[in-house]
Image (cartoon, rainbow, N blue to C red):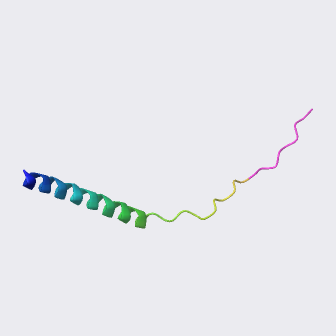
Amino acid sequence: MCYEFDEMYWKARQADEARRKKAADDSKDKPSAPAKPAAPEVKPREPVPA
């Protein structure tokens, strides 16, 4: 019975390590976000005809 738990633990650890490695690889591929987001362009208001 101990052997079965060891095998289950080993498989879970392998899956966890694979998931972490994939996440690390994905984060390397993405460009980093800019430190300060660009301000949205503000259009001047047009006067409302009265």
Q: Percent position (x, y) of residue 31?
A: 49, 65
Number of numbered discs: 0
Name the outermost residue toward the top.
50
Q: Is residue 45 left or right of residue 28?
A: right
Q: Percent position (x, y) of residue 12?
A: 21, 54
Q: Is residue 45 left or right of residue 3?
A: right
Q: Percent position (x, y) of residue 28?
A: 41, 67
Q: Residue at x 63, y 59 (%)?
A: 37
Can residue 47 be found in the magenta stretch? yes
Name the outermost residue toward the front.
2
Q: Split into 4 quadrants, where in the image is the C terminus?
A: top right
Q: Nearer the viewer, residue 24 or 14?
A: 14
Q: Nearer the viewer, residue 7 or 35?
A: 7
Q: Residue at x 13, y 56 (%)?
A: 6
Q: Residue at x 37, y 64 (%)?
A: 24
Quarter occupied by residue 49: top right
Name the outermost residue toward the right.
50
Can residue 30 be found in the magenta stretch? no
Q: Is residue 8 left or right of residue 25?
A: left
Q: Residue at x 88, y 41 (%)?
A: 47
Q: Percent position (x, y) of residue 43?
A: 77, 50
Boundaries of the magenta span: 42-50
Q: Is residue 48 left or right of residue 41?
A: right
Q: Taken as a whole, is the magenta stretch helix, strand or loop?
A: loop
